[in-house]
Amino acid sequence: MLRRTLRALGVPVSRTDLRELAYALTAPVAGVLGAVLLYPLLAFGLVLAVTHLGLPLLAAVLAGARGIGTVHRRLLRSLLGEDVPAPPRPGPGVRAALTDGAGWRTLAFGLLAAPLGVLVLLVAVGLRLYGLAAVLYPLWWRYVSADGHRGLSLGTGALDTGPRALLVALAGLGVCALAGWAGRRLLALTRWLGRMLLGPDRLSERVRDLEQSRALVVHDSAMTLRRIERDLHDGAQAQLIAVTMALASARGRLGRRDPDGTLPAADLARGQELVEQALGNARAAVSDLRDLVRGIHPPVLDTGLDAALETLAARTGLPVRLRTELPERLPEEVETIAYFCASELLNNAARHSGAGLVELTAAHRDGLLRLVVRDEGRGGAVLVPGTAKGGSGLSGLAERVRAVDGRLLVDSPAGGPTTVTVEVPS
């Protein structure tokens, strides 16, 4: 509550607030330096566009804008937490550069960065300092003089008494609150412009994502079929063949009779042994088939994702603190992906984290299922992006989630804690 109140008054109380202040101080420098380079070169390029020199100069301006855009993307990522992917590079040649929409959007951001950065600096830093000076006015008004009296003067009179100084301090609090609110709105605008202008075109990015997702789905289906075939061939099929051979041998043993019509004791014992062996192999085959079916679609999901997660938590080798906020049912494909993600992440935590407790949270809000697995272990988990040719561990989960337009986020500094978040639209 205290932190929220201080933040509402414009006081930076978190790392995020401090990073935003750092961005407000550094972004204008990058914006002004970029404008000093881009504005005159763009003007010369437009003036000379009617000559042979103008078009190559405009292409060079676009190339320079891409370099400046890289600087702004790094500032957005490191200070504002806005990870904007770099747009694809244009093809070779002046024509390709001039028809590159991403280059022109990056140029537009470079032209807007200077005035926007200066405005952010004036509001988030300058206005906040002005409000802070007013908040501290009761401490320093006696040490200044104006118009022959202590304190500052306004058009309505002098601010030379304690009550008036307190009123100035209250006004300063309002100014600080306004600076914090307006600064956050300007930074939100900066983030939005960064996403719109510095990243790849949304339509082309969507097409590329769909192509990659299709390749991942095809690959995942092929690998699933291959795994089923291998499990059946090496597991249940081999065991059923052993059952058949054992039963055939037992039939041969039990079919031998002495002249008096009785079975030899040795053959009877061996036949019983073979029958017992066949019975054990049959049970193992049934168990393997049951595990195979469970791997394709866990029957526990038929009762809902919350019950399935409770079962997973109970089977994990570590204590699991489970919290769920789920509707009665979600789409089947969403529940299946969430179940397998939770199973893999809990198993990873039990095998590799060294933690004594795992927290599993599943919540559904605004059409998004968010699954969070957190442990206080040794950390160091790394998500290495996979490709359509394969991925294992976290990368395999990321590819599976991406196939349904979801995403997987990993926060695992060395020494812990490790937090893995899976977001799946539903």
Image: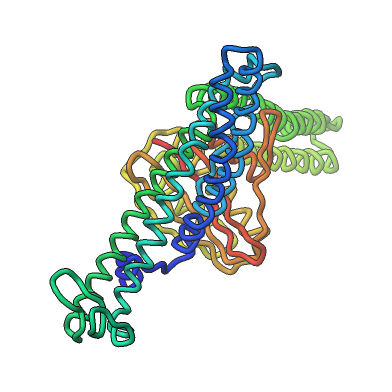
The percent coordinates of residue 144 (x first, y second) are: 32, 83
Q: Is residue 209 visible?
A: no
Left or right of 390, for residue 199: left
- The vertical placement of 31 against 128, above or below, is above
Residue drawn at 25 percent across, 66 percent down:
174
User: Which image quadrant is residue 272 in?
Assistant: top right
Q: Nearer the viewer, residue 53 or 208?
A: 53
Q: Position of residue 363 (x, y in %)?
A: 38, 50
Q: Is residue 215 above or below residue 79?
A: above
Residue lying at 73% horizontally and 28% vertically, measured from the top left: 233
- In the picture shown, does residue 334 fall above or below 125? above
Relative to residue 386, is residue 41 drawn left or right? Answer: left
Quadrant where the C terminus sits is top left
- Which quadrant would residue 348 be assigned to in this image? bottom right
Q: Split into 4 quadrants, where in the image is the N terminus?
A: bottom left
Q: Is residue 283 left or right of residue 160?
A: right
Say above or below: 52 vs 63. above
| Residue at 30% across, 75% down | 135
Q: Position of residue 355 (x, y in %)?
A: 61, 67
Is any atom of residue 98 visible in this view? yes
The residue nearer to you, when weighing 47 against 197, is 47
Nearer-the-camera pick, 86 or 289: 86
Question: In x, y percent, where is residue 324?
Answer: 38, 54
